[in-house]
Amino acid sequence: MSDRHYTLFEKQQQARGIDLEAVKKKLQKLQVETPSWGFGDSGTRFKVFQQEGIPRDPFEKLEDAAQVHKHTGSSPAVAIHIPWDKVDNYKDLKTHAEGLGVSIGAVNPNLFQDDDYKFGSLTNTDPAIRRKALDHLLECIDIARKVDSNVLSLWFADGTNYPGQADFRKRKNWMLEGLKSMYDALDDSMRMLIEYKFFEPGFYHTDFADWGMAFNAANKLGSQAEVLVDTGHHPQATNIEHIVAYLLDEQKLGGFHFNSRKYADDDLIVGAHDPYEVFLILQQIVQAEEDPDPAVRKNAENIAYMLDQCHNLEPKIPAMIRSIENVQTMYAKACLVNLEELRTAQEKQDVLGAERAIRSAFEADVTPLLEAFREETGASVKPMDAYYSSGYGEKILSRGKGGASW
């Protein structure tokens, strides 16, 4: 890093009323979990493409995830998926993670791959299958206890393909009944995050189709239930930052699954197609962190950030590093918005002045800031270059092909 470049950048931002030391403190608090499944083999519905060096078990997934945190400094936890990451002894998994300098993050139940769930899990017309699905959710709570996780991340593939295939209202009530039983089993420190998706794999309807349905269920369940926003789970042109602001104001924004999409739920590297959208989402959160309402501030500071990506063609670890770098970049830019300038322009109904307050932050080159932040926190100043120079990618090729796949 060039001290001269940082000093110049610092002076420029001071002139705009921005304290870079305060921004670096915010960056230090930014933690984005990597998903264990993102390190495994994956593909499209047509083909799973195998790569050399893919982790063969959850322990090796943690080893790869630790590389992402080592170089970026912002991904100290790894979300796990059950049963993909099922092991005989979860305390051993937790100990292995700690030895690598990371921890186990959110626990994600899988209620979409078993044959019994062909026509739904908690919404299945068969009470025995609904009970099986609930038992799996309760199992995941127990696993969360064993790995010291306090977040259960819930996505349901439940849905239908044709009109008349199922009774919407019955399914709604079965879903809420199952979630209530799960909610009642949570420890006081735990949260359950309800994720929504407007289509896929059900093409006619899904049981949690949008944020309003997830929000309604979370309100009915209680304060430990919140909404999870996956940035790829919306119809084209949805204003996600508006949804984020609404949920923050209601203190119900629980977490994110960050990825990028062009047409559907593409699960690509964060910001690959619309980095401005990521910036605008994070700007709403940064602004909420300064809100006069302590409840809003608390919600903004307690969001569970996670990646949820399917790297079909890219090498897995570099793809994760790129995503974390992109989140860091957009978050740093969001911290450069002069909120006083923005509020003044809004109060004066100065449309272009308000847009300029946002745009000038987005257009700033935050490279000197991020390099200074990484250097001060012991991460790699240039994460991608450092990873490629480390030799780790070549070392794991000895695993061969045929690693973990979902």
Image: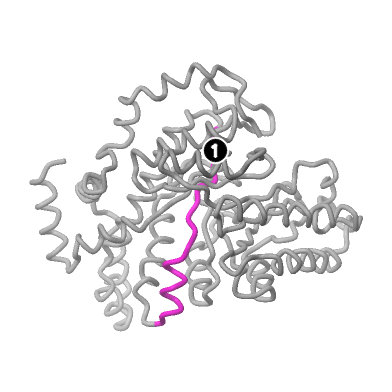
* For residue 17, above or below residue 132: below
Residue type at the position of mark 1: Gly
- Asked whether, in this view, residue 383 is left or right of residue 63, the answer is left
The image quadrant of residue 172 is bottom right
Q: Residue at x 65, y 56 (%)?
A: 154
Considering depth in this image, is 271 or 120 the residue closer to the camera?
Answer: 120
- Asked whether, in this view, residue 8 is left or right of residue 241, the answer is left
Residue holding disc 1: 38
Q: Does the magenta stretch include residue 307?
A: yes
Q: In which quarter of the image is the C terminus?
A: top right
Q: Position of residue 114 (x, y in %)?
A: 79, 42
- Asked whether, in this view, residue 309 is left or right of residue 208, the answer is left
Q: Is residue 136 magenta?
A: no
Span shown in magenta: 293-311
* For residue 204, above or below residue 338: above
The image quadrant of residue 134 is bottom right
Outermost residue toward the left in this view: 4
Q: Quadrant of the N terminus?
A: top left
Q: Position of residue 12 (x, y in %)?
A: 13, 59
The image quadrant of residue 288 is bottom left
Q: Where is residue 138 in the image (x, y as percent from the top left)?
A: 73, 57
Q: State the scheme by which the image is colored.
A: one colour
* For residue 311, above or below residue 110: above
- Asked whether, in this view, residue 78 is left or right of residue 334, the answer is right
Considering depth in this image, is 393 or 202 the residue closer to the camera?
Answer: 393
Q: Position of residue 203 (x, y in %)?
A: 75, 50
Q: Which residue is drawn at 69% across and 70% down?
A: 217
User: Alpha-carbon neighbours of circle 1 within 10 Å: few (<14), some, or many (≥20)?
Assistant: many
Considering depth in this image, is 283 or 175 the residue closer to the camera?
Answer: 175
